[in-house]
Image (cartoon, rainbow, N blue to C red):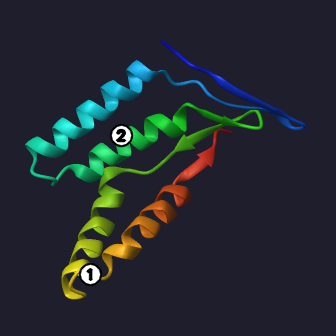
């Protein structure tokens, strides 16, 4: 089952062409990977699910592409966890923003 949401504007169509069953499958797989590796492979699961979402997104007629890798995120993830421990949890409030910045930095338009 696929649900397309189209928004027309002057420069082209913006839409998401992924399906619910695919999203559920990728999310369940990511959750299982995270669970069975005790969270160590969470960056890989996150890249897998987020990459699927971005790769199925079209903005103003231009498809997005996610270029991030689990290895690239893993180094940041370790740094963020250490900062959370050092600051007794306070840095945890900034991790969500840091993760969004990393995602955007690794998202481009398909040439």
Looking at the rendered structure, the secondary structure element under dot 1 is: helix
Looking at the rendered structure, the secondary structure element under dot 2 is: helix
Seen at 15% across and 54% down, the residue is 40
Q: Is residue 10 above or below residue 89?
A: above
- List x then y, in percent, for residue 8: 82, 31
How dense is the environment of label 2, judged by Cα within 10 Å: few (below 14), some, or many (20 and up)? some
The mark closer to the camera, 1 or 2, is: 1
List the residue tagged with mark 1: 83
Q: Earlier in the sequence, mark 1 or mark 2?
A: 2
108 horizontally vs 106: left or right: right
Residue 25 lies in what quarter of the image? top left
Number of labelled discs?
A: 2
List the residue tagged with mark 2: 48
Report the Cα–Cα distance between label 1 and label 2: 25 Å
- List x then y, in percent, for residue 79: 27, 75
Residue 57 lies in what quarter of the image? top right
Seen at 28% across and 43% down, the residue is 45
Quadrant the C terminus occupies? top right
Q: Nearer the viewer, residue 108 or 101?
A: 101
How dense is the environment of label 1, judged by Cα within 10 Å: few (below 14), some, or many (20 and up)? some
């Amino acid at each position: 089952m696929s649900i397309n949401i189209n928004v027309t504007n002057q420069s082209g169509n913006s839409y998401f062409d992924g399906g619910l069953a695919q999203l559920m499958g990728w999310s369940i797989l990511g959750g299982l990977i995270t669970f069975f590796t005790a969270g160590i492979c969470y960056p890989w699961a996150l890249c897998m699910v987020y990459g699927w979402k971005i790769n199925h997104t079209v903005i103003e007629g231009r498809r997005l592409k996610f270029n991030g890798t689990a290895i690239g995120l893993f180094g940041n993830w370790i740094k963020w966890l250490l900062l959370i421990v050092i600051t007794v949890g306070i840095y945890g409030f900034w991790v969500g923003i840091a993760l969004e910045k990393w995602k955007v930095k690794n998202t481009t338009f398909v040439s």
